[in-house]
Image (cartoon, rainbow, N blue to C red):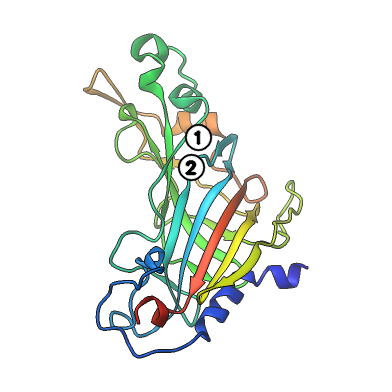
Amino acid sequence: MSSKTDRLIAGLIAVAAVAVMAPAALAATPAPGFGQFANCPSPAENPAVAGCFTATVKGGHFQMGSKDVPITNPMTISGGTLSDGTVVKGPVGPILTPVKQKVPGGVVGLTGLTWLLEILGSEALTLYAVTETAGTITISETLNMPVKVHLINSTLGNNCYVGSTSSPIKLALTFGTTNPPPPNVPITGTAPEFSFENGIVKAKNGVLVDNSFSAPGASGCVLTLFGFIPISINGLVNTQSGLPAPAGTNETKQVVDQEVTDPHLVYP
């Protein structure tokens, strides 16, 4: 199972790449029934695009260090793929939509500063995590996605992150079985349910997994009290959250629905 499931994403792209070919598009407007691929560049915009895809992460969790964030709000990954597996974006938006996920424990759980409740109240201390891309996404035997996690709360400033473009969290997501360093043990994803409709390969209810990645320490986290007293709390965040966290101590599972097709069908 693992040798095949590890190549499922690449297989989807390969199927789409050999679909029915048509003349190059004249305008970057998806055909009826293909609007979900609007973030895929048309052949006129990028002749090198071999496939169009969209994926919705509709559940799962993301755990790094001692913090485990459930994925409760769907995230969309969309764009086009080149023949070497590189993912490129179109004119609509980012490849990965910025979606807030509520972090259990809020700012108090992140910092351990319980006295903040007395000053600011629980509502003001709600904390969100937004996963953003931090480099080029590629598709091979795994979905290789460098990311950074933006920790959002008005008291933390605008630049509180775990990971960065220069030091990203490097995910290698697979439907197959992982091979992490200890203390983690291998985990196995779930192959999606395939169907084919109107030139679109559909893969539903797959589970992508990775527990081999490392997570760097936090940076840019500044606690601003009373609107004008800034205090750097990177050290507090790292201590309370178990960061930096080496490979073999983190895990993500992501339930995904995917659709893949040929760009010439999207832009006939």
**Residue projecting furthest to the top:** 118
| CA gap, disc 1 and disc 2 | 6 Å
Judging depth in this view, the residue of 83 and 120 nearest the camera is: 83
Asked if 150 appears above or below 258 in the picture, the reply is above
Place of residue 118 in the rendered image (x, y in percent of width and height, measured from the top left): 39, 9
Q: Secondary structure at mark 1?
A: helix
User: Total marks drawn?
Assistant: 2
Q: Is residue 23 left or right of residue 146?
A: left
Give the position of the N terminus as an image quadrant: bottom right
Residue type at mark 1: give it: Asn
Q: Residues within 10 Å of mark 2 (few under 14, many from 20)?
A: some
Whether pointer 1 and pointer 2 mark residues with C-beta atoms closer than 8 Å, the reply is yes
For the point 76% across and 50% down, the residue is 185
Q: Secondary structure at mark 2?
A: loop
Tag of residue 238: 1
For the point 72% across and 72% down, the residue is 4
For the point 46% across and 28% down, the residue is 236
Tag of residue 35: none
Task: Find residue 68 and report its image quarter.
Answer: top right
**Residue projecting furthest to the left:** 228
Q: Residues within 10 Å of mark 1 (few under 14, many from 20)?
A: many
Place of residue 239 in the rendered image (x, y in percent of width and height, measured from the top left): 53, 31
Residue type at mark 2: give it: Gly
Judging depth in this view, the residue of 84 and 198 nearest the camera is: 198
Place of residue 115 in the rendered image (x, y in percent of width and height, measured from the top left): 43, 12
Give the position of the C terminus as an image quadrant: bottom left
Task: Find residue 161 and report its image quarter.
Answer: top left
Place of residue 255 in the rendered image (x, y in percent of width and height, measured from the top left): 60, 51
Residue occupied by mark 2: 217
Q: Earlier in the sequence, mark 1 or mark 2?
A: 2
